[in-house]
Amino acid sequence: MSTLTTRKARQFSLRVLGRTLEHLGVQTYKRRDTAIAELVANCWDAGAENVSITVPDESSYDFRTSRITIRDDGCGMAEDEVQNAYLVIGRDRRKSGSAAIESRKVMGRKGIGKLAGFGIASRMVVRTWRNGALTEFTLNVDDLNKPDNEVGNVAIDASVGRPPADLGEHGTELELNTLKHLTPLDIAGLRDALARRFSRTARGEMTILVNDLRIQEPPLEMTDRFPGEADTYLKDEIQLADGRNGQVRYYYGFAKKPIRSRELRGFTIYVHEKTAQAPPFFFDVEATATGQHGTKYVTGAIEVDFLDDGPTDLISTDRQEIDWEADEVQPFKKWGDELSRRVLRDWRDRKEQRAEAWILEATDIRRRIEALDSPSQKQVKRFLRTLGRVEGDSEESVRSLADSLVQAYEFRHFHDVVQEIEATDDDPESLRILLKHLREWQVLESRAILEVVRGRLEIVDKFRTMIADDAPETAPRVGDDNIHDLLAGYPWLLNPEWQILAEEKAISTQLREWTFTEIEDEDSRLRYDYLALSDDHRLVVVDIKRPGIAVGLDELQRLERYKERLARAEGRNLHMLLVCGVELNVTPGTRETWKERKDGEILLWSRLCDRAKAHYEQYRAILERHITDPSFARKTEEVRQTRHVLESGTSYRGREARARGLGPQDITLEDDTKA
């Protein structure tokens, strides 16, 4: 502010006891937002229509040099009024009958709010003007203090003169300097705090700016508000302890998402347009109320002026808390307890109903629930309503949780069926009912197979990673991840429509098993990787090469020797498959010859992965339409095996698994015989 153009000296005095002023300011108003709100309340009582607060931003903040100013266009003070009113600590403005605007309810009562600045600053410069005269003086907490238990007058030098031309006819400015906090103010947080510390009525009659931006409650996306129209209130009457009826005005609403700011959660209680109980507040019922998770979604305000109309002071000095132990407050406390419980219960019921309806809009989930038995449907729907209270999750994640919930019920009976059958003991009727239910659980089969297919797709992804990492063909030591063991555990990776007959077998051994007697010396040295039966009932001899190994003419000729020896014994043509990671290291002519062969194929590992994945993606799409599969019984063991491989991170089988032989397949010899 501009300095005075002409001035005269004036000396004020303030009578203090010891360190009373420091205790009233520093100890009572330690929080910056609380202290600033108290000073803004003085602007209201002065009849201000506009209040401008200026606080330093983070980049320029220095507690030694930065300043906070609060300027209003209220009635201001003449120099004698400064001495006889402002510098009287404990003056009750209400009893003095000096309300600046008769229609306004006076916020101040104790007469010490002017000291709130000492909670955040050591010096307060006061400038106030009216009728062409501006009075300026400084209050320094160090100068105002006296030794403990000593009473004395403190002289306060002031100056009086004409105000600068840029000021209005009346008003007051308070400058706080020599700040006490080392860190800058959270300006956005200050706006939120002030927006909740003054009622909608107060903010409607008095514009409050923080760094030139008007404070207002951050917009909340609401699902419900009671009453429905904005800026309207419900009304109720409470019979007070003295027999009078006290009026309560209130509203509350439910946010669509958790409310981030604590200042906006719960109820704020206003008395004479200013907070008497700071948010978040639920009358201390949140730990025991039904729907207690709603405390992060509920917002509202309650106006109870009668709490400050009696002779007893029921509100803390910093306007943060009501004296809830006082007898005069008990009727209101009981009313608020009932309101909070009802509101939180209503939030829970509404959120659950919306969640259930919204989740069931997903056709797949609804259809799967309808396929469950009646008791399970009821339980699932009850838990769907509970999911509606999951905090902060996106709609996509909530639907994913719902899918997992339904799947748990689809598989619950599948995993527990043996125990349930045993539990029927010798009760025929119980067993009949159980078996009837088992017949009705048709959806379980398709969901079980779907889990198998999902597992197979994950195994394909693991297979692709192993190929990219140039995993070894076989395990060089115990526990090592290797391609051969993965293919042996999941032979469908070679071809989902093949039956793998044998793995890692010497040609001589295979010939003896076929009772072929013409065994040659070379036969014991030749060893194929796999022997398969294709979908058109041809035998396929398979040789695999590590992804990083170059394949040349020797490898092709070795595969042909496998084929030739086995074909002579079997009496029919065999097909050859060579799987490798890179193109052949042979002449163009040899490569072209193999491309045209009808009895042989060279396949890259990447192509093998793509083929397997494509097969099961299509398979999964069919299953999600709940088509059942007769091979369900063979899938249960694969589910267990897949989980083990994925959780352990290795395909190493170990001695016992090797002894058991090949893992589950889509085609069995029995299937082939029937064909």
Image (cartoon, rainbow, N blue to C red):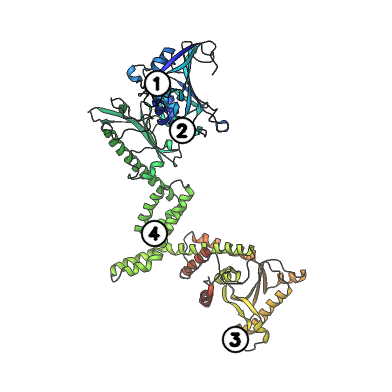
What is the spatial separation of the Cα atoms under label 1 and label 3, in whole angstroms? 108 Å
Label 4 or label 1, whichever lies nearer to me, is 1
Give the percent coordinates (x, y) of residue 361.
44, 49
What is the spatial separation of the Cα atoms under label 2 and label 4, in whole angstroms? 49 Å
Residue wearing tag 3: 512
Task: Inspect the image, locate mark 3, and give the three-letter code of the amino acid beneath it.
Answer: Arg
Task: Inspect the image, locate mark 4, and give the three-letter code of the amino acid beneath it.
Answer: Leu
Q: Closer to the N terminus: mark 2 or mark 4?
A: 2
Between 437 and 20, the one lying in front of the other is 20
Give the percent coordinates (x, y) of residue 80.
41, 12
Residue wearing tag 1: 45
Q: Closer to the N terminus: mark 1 or mark 2?
A: 1
Residue wearing tag 2: 192
Label 3 or label 2, whichever lies nearer to me, is 2
Between 489 and 612, the one lying in front of the other is 489
Between 189 and 385, the one lying in front of the other is 189
What is the spatial separation of the Cα atoms under label 1 and label 2, in whole angstroms? 22 Å
Is disc 1 surrounded by few (<14), some (14 to 19) or many (20+) residues within 10 Å? many
Task: Inspect the image, locate mark 1, and give the three-letter code of the amino acid beneath it.
Answer: Asp
Against 442, is 136 above or below?
Answer: above
What is the spatial separation of the Cα atoms under label 3 and label 4, in whole angstroms? 54 Å
Numbered mark located on residue 372 in the image: 4
Q: Are marks 4 and 1 in contact (CB under 8 Å)?
A: no
Q: What secondary structure is marked by label 1?
A: helix
